[in-house]
Amino acid sequence: MTHQHHNEQQIAYFTGRDLPRMDPRRRADTPYTRRHLDAVVAAARLQPGDQVVDVGCGPGKYTVGLAARGFDTTGLDLTPGLVEQLREVAPEVTAVEGDMVHPPAELHGRFDAVTGFFVLHHLDEIEGAFAGSRRLARPGGRVVFIEPNAYFPGFYVQVTLTPGMSWKGDKGIVHMRAGKLRRAATAAGLTDVEVTTFGAFPPALANKRWGRRLESRLESVPGWDRAKAFVVVSATA
């Protein structure tokens, strides 16, 4: 399959259907999403006023959270309809239509950080995504992605049972392994590559106070870092 054909499939997957889990009006400010933002902001070493591009941003579930924290935020996404939704929801965010593997030339070298929330597993070129992110970042800028961890069994249950999700669109989860992500980032020319994991619960539990307390206790149990729910890969351009 060519990269262009893959892009066409992804645009079709995200076009013309309700995407409640990605809706920034309902999901942008919850304990679950805030924790993901906290992890990415920390790994990117962001400071207020930094210029950030959120690649594969969709309608802006996480992009609006970055802007709310005081970062000069641009959203980049392949799907025209999702870019239009982001423009409607968050006019303070610059929303650009484009391929993160081959990002628009006018965005090259502009950003202190490149962030991506649950986007790599939808792509056919993981190394290409890191290479494209490197082009977007300024020299010394940070590139940070958060993804579902391939070793966490809950995601396979979720994709199989959740209406609107399918292995056609989310099959890349099997590639979201620390070693593979580290090798892809290094091959793309990024340096200081770090990979960490965290989390155990889906939103239905993580958004409840008792769920967060229980999750914290589970995470403190030694010996299962490799299989925690989310993997964060960060590197320097």
Image (cartoon, grey):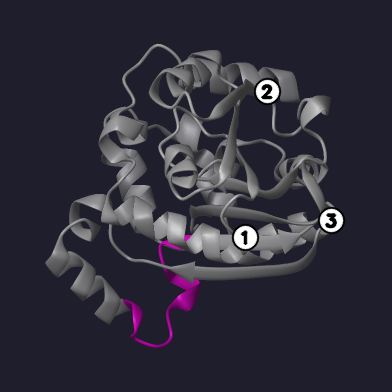
Kind of residue at badge 3? Ala
What residue is shown at x 38% (from left), y 49% (from top)?
A: 156
Label tally: 3
Whether 117 is drawn above or below 90: the answer is below
What residue is shown at x 73% (from left), y 25% (from top)?
A: 3
Whether 81 is drawn above or below 121: the answer is above
Residues tagged 3 and 2 counted as in contact (Cβ below 8 A): no
Is residue 206 toward the left or the right of residue 28 in the image? left
Kind of residue at badge 2? Gly
Q: Residue 109 in the image: x percent, y percent?
A: 82, 41
Q: Label for residue 107?
A: none
* Front one among 62 and 91: 91
Tag nearer the camera, 2 or 1: 1
Q: Tell me the residue that label 3 is attached to.
A: 187
Q: CA distance from mark 3 to mark 2?
A: 23 Å
What element does badge 2 sit on? loop
Tag nearer the camera, 3 or 1: 1
Q: Residues within 10 Å of mark 1 (few under 14, many from 20)?
A: many
Nearer-N-terminus badge (2/1):
1
The quarter of the picture where residue 194 lies is: bottom right
Q: Label for residue 44?
A: 1
Q: Tell me the residue that label 2 is attached to.
A: 98
What element does badge 1 sit on? helix
